[in-house]
Amino acid sequence: MPTRQCPHCGKVIFDQSTQCPYCREALSAVPEVRLRNPHRAVGRGKIRQGLLCVLLAALVHYFAGGYSGLQLPFPIAPLVTIYLSPLLLLSGLGLSLSGMILQHKA
Ligand SMILES: [Zn+2]
């Protein structure tokens, strides 16, 4: 027979019991699940996405700017290193910052 832990006293009881035999507290049929704060999880996800964007911008700038010494088989327009990779970096920083604010508010 499956068992679970009593949410009131912590002792192991049968899964189907409606009252704890130890502390006599009434139990719900389905064990309660505590949900995490959704705003906090969203904020954490945004921080992660923003930091990933920053990493991607650094990689793009490193290889497209010619700092790696690796000869790329195709030419990359200077537009990428002048505007696009810094824009991606700033966007990633902004996304991380908004995630931190969301997480702090939650
Ligand atoms: Zn109990």
Image (cartoon, rainbow, N blue to C red):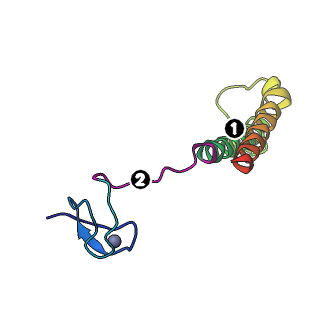
Q: Is residue 39 magenta?
A: yes
Query: Residue 60 location in percent, x, y?
Result: 72, 37
Q: Amino acid at mark 2?
A: Val
Q: Earlier in the sequence, mark 1 or mark 2?
A: 2
Can you identify the residue that label 2 sits on? 33
Considering depth in this image, is 73 or 91 the residue closer to the camera? 91
Q: Is residue 8 left or right of residue 74?
A: left
What distance separates the C-alpha of mark 1 from that of mark 2? 55 Å
Picture layout, residue 46 above or below residue 20: above
Look at 74% across and 35% down and name the residue there: 64
Select label 1 or label 2 by which is in front: 2
Label for residue 71?
Answer: 1
The question of residue 31 being in magenta is answered with yes
What is the quadrant of residue 74 in the picture? Answer: top right
Residues drawn in magenta: 29-40
The type of residue carrying mark 1 is Gln
Query: Is 99 located above or below residue 18 in the figure?
Result: above
* Quarter of image, res 91: top right
User: Residue sitting at 18 percent across and 63 percent down?
Assistant: 2
Where does residue 5 sit, x and y in percent of width and height? 32, 68
The image shows residue 17, relative to residue 96, as above or below, that is below
Q: Are marks 1 and 2 in contact (CB under 8 Å)?
A: no
